[in-house]
Amino acid sequence: MDILNNYFNQFLLVIFLAVAAFLGVQVRTLYCKYVTTEIKQNVCKTVVRFVEQVYKDIHGPEKLREAVKKASEMLDGYGIKISEDELITMIEAAVNEFNNAFNKG
């Protein structure tokens, strides 16, 4: 009976460790996803302000191209990979937020 009890306790320990490891990986994945998204948004907001201030003589697609280039460089520095479509979307959202704040103020 003692041997059976010992195996059962070891089995429970293995199950507990497996569940704890799984939960740890899931929490880390969610945390990294949240932090990465926040960094992307902050970079896009910073780049929009930078491009608006530095490139006053260009407009439209040229300005967007400069913003995409600069944001890509900054995100590469953080080791964050992003598709061009996602980057353009986030930059356009930052531009919209910038314009709304500018028009209200």
Image (cartoon, grey):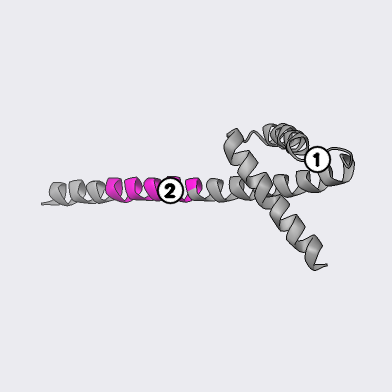
Residue 51: quarter of image: top right
Whether residue 91 appears in this view of the structure is yes
Q: Which residue is mark 1?
A: 59
Residue sitting nearer the eye, 35 or 88: 88
Marks 2/1 in contact by CB < 8 Å: the verdict is no
Q: Residue furthest left?
A: 1
- The residue at 77%/43% (across/down) is 47
Q: Which residues are magenta?
A: 13-29
Q: CA distance from mark 2 to mark 1?
A: 43 Å
Which element carries disc 2, helix, strand or loop?
helix
Mark in front: 2 vs 1: 1
Horizontal relation, residue 77 to residue 33: left or right: right
- The residue at 76%/57% (across/down) is 99
**Disc 1 residue type (three-letter):** His
- Across the whole image, how many numbered discs are drawn on residues? 2
User: Residue 105, position in %: x, y?
Assistant: 83, 67
Helix, strand or loop: magenta stretch: helix
Q: Which residue is mark 2?
A: 26
- The residue at 75%/40% (across/down) is 60
Residue 53 shown in magenta: no
Which element carries disc 1, helix, strand or loop?
loop
- The residue at 77%/46% (across/down) is 48
User: Residue 45, position in %: x, y?
Assistant: 73, 49
Horizontal relation, residue 82 to residue 20: left or right: right
**Disc 2 residue type (three-letter):** Gln
Horizontal relation, residue 24 to residue 32: left or right: left
Residue 87: quarter of image: top right
Q: Residue furthest front?
A: 60
Tell me if mark 1 has few (under 14), some (14-19) or many (20+) residues whose alpha carbon lies within 10 angstroms of its own: few
